[in-house]
Amino acid sequence: MLVEETDSGFRPIRLRSLREHVHEELRQAIISGRLKSGARLNERQLAADLGTSTSPLKEALRQLEAEGLVRTEPRRGSFVTFSQRQAEEMMLARAALESIIARQAARHGSVEAFDLLRSVIGKMLAAVESGDVEELIRMNEQFHDAIHDASGCEYLRRLQNTQRTYDHAARVTVLSQEEVRRISFLEHEAIMKAIVSRDEDAAERLMRQHIMDAGKTHIELVF
């Protein structure tokens, strides 16, 4: 399992699939703003911070370059390229997908699926009131997963899954603010009520607005 963070903010890795976990750590560091746009990535230092060799690090950097988060230049090294414009595009893509999925959940969701949404909202409220940010993030992700399940969408869910790491990193950043946590909960509660009452228009509208607001907060905090 992962151990405590180092002074640099990275968690040394003690897992079997090193490349995947190095990639995840670096991707989250970039999206959360810990590694700033334009920053040169020192491979030896990063490998030391992550507690691994440079081989899985180089593989992870190639993957990040394919995702448009890193640029590698011959004889110069690798640089972070994640920008405000890119974050805006990710926000817009997620808002479009999640709002349609919420609409489909309101239309096609079962009674059992709606009961699960109500249950998750209750757990989210408990996490907000106790200040348990990690639990709130976990319930936040479970809430969106429950909407995806309720929708019955397959193609849209596959598209949305490509953004999961971005979504998680953005949530960690955004939900670090207590006021934002409370506002976010109220937005999730309103989305749940729209879905379980089968108000398709409201479910779509509220989900889109929620994603846009969260995305704008993420951009303000990172850039």
Image: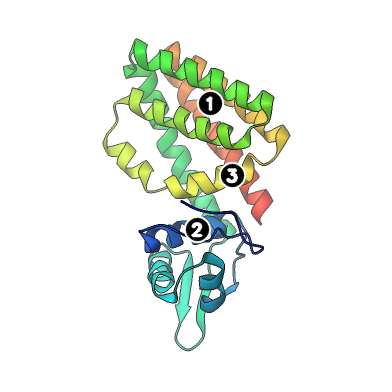
Residue 143 position in % (x across, y down):
47, 27
Amino acid of disc 3: Val
Amino acid of disc 1: Leu
Residue 211 position in % (x across, y down):
53, 37
On the image, numbered disc 2 is attached to which residue?
25
Q: What residue do we see at 70% from left, 39% from top?
A: 177
- Report crowding for label 1: few under 14, some 14 to 19, many 20 or more residues within 10 A (C-alpha): many
In this rendering, the answer to whether 119 lies above or below 158 is above
Q: N-terminal of the two: label 1 or label 3?
A: 3
Q: Nearer the viewer, residue 122 or 156?
A: 122
Q: What residue do we see at 36% from left, 58% from top?
A: 16
Q: N-terminal of the two: label 2 or label 1?
A: 2
Left or right of 130, for residue 188: left
Q: Are marks 2 and 1 in contact (CB under 8 Å)?
A: no
On the image, numbered disc 3 is attached to which residue?
172
Q: Secondary structure at mark 3?
A: helix
Amino acid of disc 2: Glu
In this rendering, the answer to whether 169 lies above or below 139 is below
Most extreme residue toward the left is: 154
| Measured Cα–Cα span from mark 2 to mark 3 | 13 Å
Q: Are marks 2 and 3 in contact (CB under 8 Å)?
A: no
Q: Is residue 164 shown to the viewer in this render?
A: yes
Q: Secondary structure at mark 1?
A: helix
| Measured Cα–Cα span from mark 1 to mark 3 | 21 Å
| Measured Cα–Cα span from mark 2 to mark 1 | 31 Å
Residue 178 position in % (x across, y down):
71, 34
Q: Secondary structure at mark 2?
A: helix
On the image, numbered disc 1 is attached to which residue?
206
Q: N-terminal of the two: label 2 or label 3?
A: 2
Q: What residue do we see at 31% from left, 18% from top?
A: 108
